[in-house]
Image (cartoon, helix red, strand yellow):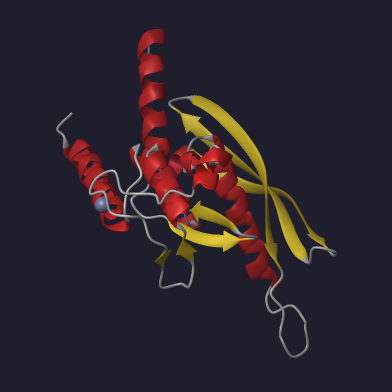
Amino acid sequence: MDPNSNGVYFADVYKKLAAPFETTFHDTRGGLELEYITGEQAVTRLNEVLGVAGWSFRVLEHGYHEEADEVWVLGELTANFGGTVVNRQQFGSQKVKRSRASSTPLDIGFDLKGASTDALKKCASLLGVGLYLSRKEAPAEPAAEARAEPLVCEECGEELKETRFKDGTSWSPAQLAGYGRRKHGRALCMAHYREANEAKRRAAQALEEAPF
Ligand SMILES: [Zn+2]
């Protein structure tokens, strides 16, 4: 490979690794909305882009933190980019699941597996996988909040409403507007947000199927 085509190769692989996911999950922790992908999605992305033989993951260290009642794992992801091998290391953790009756751990192997999946996802994010999900939102302007003007959809003009999900979590109008701006460059109502996600997914699919 000449240096130029090497650069093109890296840019192309990075684009594939960092491509947005059509399905993401959300959770609220400490009042913060988290958008995340599963370990399975991260592994599938690595398999599809780098090839099954193109990456590996190993646990370098693991332990238990008593005060947090968490197991932790230091993991290392090794990836082969067309002959160039890179390593990324990150920590992962998981709360120990305990029996309600006796408070003894139910399955430490399962807890460690969860912690290493967490470490793997974080290592993969250093290679771009799902990295966009951890982008920090700019803090809302205090002036805008003080005015308390209703947020409206930039597609249909409808006022944004709080959206509740089946899992019991919900997005406030400000959160919905934030996700719309981040993913699609404008505040959208839930219907138009979903429509824009779908359009993006179809566009990505069309690109995948393009014959080159
Ligand atoms: Zn709308």
212 lies left or right of 125: left
- Farthest residue, direction bottom: 101
Q: Nearer the viewer, residue 97 or 54?
A: 97
Q: In this view, which residue lies farthest toward the left?
A: 211
Q: Check the image and report above or below for 166 versus 54.
A: below
Where 169 sits versus 206, above or below?
Answer: below
The quarter of the picture where residue 206 lies is top left
- The residue at 40%/51% (across/down) is 150
Report x, y in % for residue 136. Answer: 55, 39
Image quadrant in which the N terminus is located: top left
Against 127, is 47 above or below? below
The answer to whether residue 12 is seen in the rendering is: yes
Q: Is residue 71 left or right of residue 88?
A: right
* Residue plotted at (49% across, 32% down): 80
Residue ID at (54%, 54%): 34
Instruction: Decide which of 31, 13 is in the foreground and name it.
Output: 31
x and y, in percent, of residue 177 in the image: 41, 48
Residue 137 visible in the picture: no
| Residue 190 spot, x, y in % from top left | 32, 57
Query: Left or right: where does residue 132 sit relative to residue 91?
Result: left
Q: Which residue lies furthest to the front in this view?
A: 147
Q: Residue 99 at what x, y percent from top left?
A: 71, 84
Compared to residue 100, the image places residue 12 above or below, namely above
